[in-house]
Amino acid sequence: MIEDCHAVVAVTLALAAPVGPLAEATSVAKLAVFAMVNLALIQLKRKKHAGPDPLWRVPVWAPWTGLAANLGMIGGALFSN
């Protein structure tokens, strides 16, 4: 039932709106999600927890670099018009 509703909304948006702005909004939304994931990774790196030893360690600069790249691409997408 819910899947049918999603399909109706998707078809309605595809027919009512031009595809270009819809695709750009989707790309910006994905970049925003990736930025939030990088923020979560930064918070996890700051916490000291007594859990099991991880299988691999991510350097501190990796989520910061990802966050900067995502925010830069979001800014480029929003201010390019």
Image: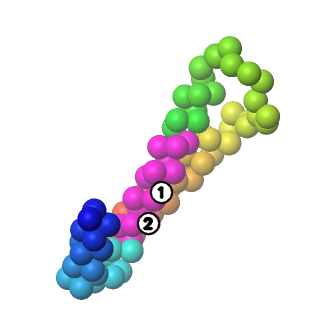
Q: Is residue 77 above or below residue 44?
A: below
Q: What residue type is labelled 1?
A: Leu
* Residue 17 seen in this snapshot: no
To which quarter of the image does residue 49 belong? top right
**Which label sits on residue 49?**
none
To which quarter of the image does residue 6 belong? bottom left
Q: In this view, does 22 lie above or below 58?
A: below
Residue at 58%, 33% (x, y): give it.
Answer: 42
Residue 19: image location, x then y, percent = 33, 82
Image check: 6 left or right of 26?
Answer: left
Residue segment shown in magenta:
24-38
Q: Is residue 65 above or below residue 51?
A: below
Q: How far apart are marks 2 and 1 (CA)?
A: 6 Å
Q: Is mark 1 on a helix, strand or loop?
A: helix
**Which label sits on residue 27?**
2
The residue identified by callout 1 is 31
Image check: 19 left or right of 60?
Answer: left
Residue at 58%, 36% (x, y): give it.
Answer: 41
